[in-house]
Amino acid sequence: MKKGEAKHKIEQISEQLRTHNYSYYVLSEPSISDYDFDMLLEELQKLEEQFPQFAFEDSPTKRVGGEITKNFKTVKHKYQMLSLGNSYSKEDIVDFETRIKKLVENELEYICELKYDGVAIGITYENGKLVQAVTRGDGVQGDDITANVKTIRSIPLQLKGNDYPDEFEIRGELFYPKNVFEALNKEREEIGEDLYANARNTASGTLKMQDSSIVAQRKLDCYLYFVLGENLPFETHYESIEKAGEWGFKIPTEKRNYIRKCKSIDEIFEFINYWDKERNNLNFEIDGVVIKVNNYARQEEIGFTAKSPKWAIAYKFKAEKVSTKLLEITYQVGRTGSITPVANLQPVLLAGTTVKRASLHNADQIEKIDVRVNDTVFVEKGGEIIPKIVGVEVKQRDIFSEPTKYIDSCPECETTLVRKDGDAKHYCPNEWGCPPQIKGKMQHFISRKAMNIDGLGEETIDLLFKTGLAITIADLYELNYDQLFELESFKEKKSQNIIDGLIDSKQIPFERVLYGIGIRYVGETVAKKLARQFKNIDKISSASFEELIAADEIGDKIAESIIYFFSVGENVELINRLRVHVQFELSEDQLANATTKLEGLIFVVSGVFSKFSRDELKNTIEQNGGKVSSSISKKTSYIVAGENMGPSKLAKAEKLEVTIINEDKFLKLIQ
Ligand code: IVH
């Protein structure tokens, strides 16, 4: 392809992808199938690899992150990040109106919006480009989390149209959509991590992750609610939000009743009452409604207190709470043997759903609230997904009732439970004999992100376990067609599907096999890092604690868990049986380009390259044992500079006297 043609094509596909992204992530109205989107993205990736000089700095291919931030820079807010006064009743809102009516003569119009329960962010745009994103912090200064925010698909990197101010800040709330949060917890459950209890705190944690490529996978979302700047071209808050929508931001719409112009307290209350009931049907958490004076001139007349604008107020919903009877406490055994006590309740309506069960977390929690069978308990649904028991109506307690005695043996296999120091949970240690643990291991192994074995599902695993045909993951590979065909309700096709799925899974790359064997705390990302750094299963199993924690992203907890896994005889035997079936090392391809030539060196990559895309260059550094960092420091060994290296990076490199090399010199380092 000629250069001119490539340039044009890159521009064209980038624009198409931006538009599709906007439809999908901002409007939630997909305009193309996932498959076609991926095909376009792949085409662009290939073109950008061939012609990196034409790739946009904010190309749709760059949403995958990769920048590592060790210490988030503290940044002073240009406009202080204020909070809002709270209100809890109609009287509070009447008082709010009375207060401001004393300050203005004109008739007032209000805007009611949802109060998103997430993490506040201020994002600055210059000439239509996202330049900085800062957390609230203490309101005066916050953390610069730009690299992480840039991976969030519903936040535009480049604005649409041409009527945006040269410089402005937009504020909004970052959050996990409910379904994304649930999926995240499901994954945690699969690798044996404790579940996240609360979506907001989890979002806040994600935004402080050092590796932006992990943030990119996390599917955070963002609604924007406030535009700030000098001489903004609007007269009202409502206009500013509408305009922000035109520039490509995700904003609340009247169509969905997420935002409403109101003239009176009654209208405001209609909005509040509507959402108090309907909020359970949203795919994101809200904890109230925000009421704002619409007109900027009126806002200015009304002014601010030290902490918050006097022209706006938050109305907070009450956490829904009901009382019901605790019928029984049962105990669930997870894949890793962790025991979760569950309260079985007299069914009761709460936050739009019938609640029959609530988590009791662990033995300490039960003791703390002293909850007993037959008690009348209070159940609440706050920011947490699983309803919780927040208290007991002691007055109604039967005088003969006795404190709950926590179980000391496994409800599934009767093995005596253990509780390690510092662990809140009890565990069943009978890893190889406890049915839910055995089945859980197999289910994890066949799951989509691990071996993705077509035809095998939960029911079949149950059946294989019950009939004794497979009780370990290695047994799966020793199944034959006839054994399957004889099973109840198995016909030719179903049996053959499973056999084919198993054969196909033999090609699944090492990192996914490593994830699939189910070492506690080894999730997808950790498995990838381990595979890349140790290259095969034997090097991992024989690595010392020191060697493990020296690897990227591997902390004490993971290292201990890996060492424990390979110290168990059953696991060693399992690995040896699996060895003939699955990939326990990096493929030739993955290995061919790997060396340790860059071990101990830290690189910063800047600018545009002709022989690599930036991601390729970073991968090459890592494959050869080097580390990539996003910021220049005294520890930086080399800066690999392409064309258009940023001037601030150049100045810093010169100041710290870090060696700058071009891509040819870099290639010499690894040859
Ligand atoms: S406006 C000066 N609008 O709630 C006014 N804030 O408790 C700035 N929040 O600091 C805030 N939804 O983090 C505004 N629709 C909304 C909001 C909202 C959630 C957050 C925001 C704010 C906090 C106050």
Image (cartoon, rainbow, N blue to C red):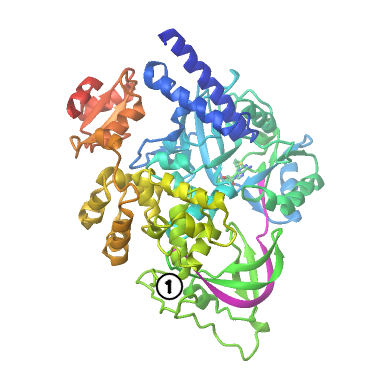
Residue 322 painted magenta: yes
Task: Please name whichever residue, 1 or 652, is drawn nearer the observer in this view of the structure.
Answer: 1
- Type of amino acid under label 1: His
Q: Residue furthest bottom?
A: 400
From the top left corner, tell me how far across and down residue 415 is, in percent. Answer: 42, 78
In the rendered image of this protein, does residue 87 appear above or below residue 5?
below
User: Which corner quadrant of the image does residue 644 belong to?
Assistant: top left
**Which quadrant is the N terminus positioned in?**
top left
Relative side of 614 to 501, left or right: left
What range is drawn magenta here?
313-335
From the top left corner, tell me how far across and down residue 269 is, in percent. Answer: 78, 49
From the top left corner, tell me how far across and down residue 107 is, in percent. Answer: 79, 36
Residue 650 painted magenta: no
Q: Residue at x 30, y 53 (%)?
A: 579
From the top left corner, tell me how far across and down residue 545 is, in percent. Answer: 23, 57
In the rendered image of this protein, does residue 85 appear above or below residue 379?
above
Asked which secondary structure carries label 1, the reply is loop
Characterize the magenta stretch by its predominant secondary structure: strand
Q: Residue at x 46, y 10 (%)?
A: 5
In the rendered image of this protein, does residue 234 appear above or below residue 514?
above
Task: Please name whichever residue, 442 or 321, is drawn nearer the observer in this view of the structure.
Answer: 442
Q: Is residue 264 visible?
A: yes
Report the residue marked by disc 1: 426
Q: Is residue 628 visible?
A: no
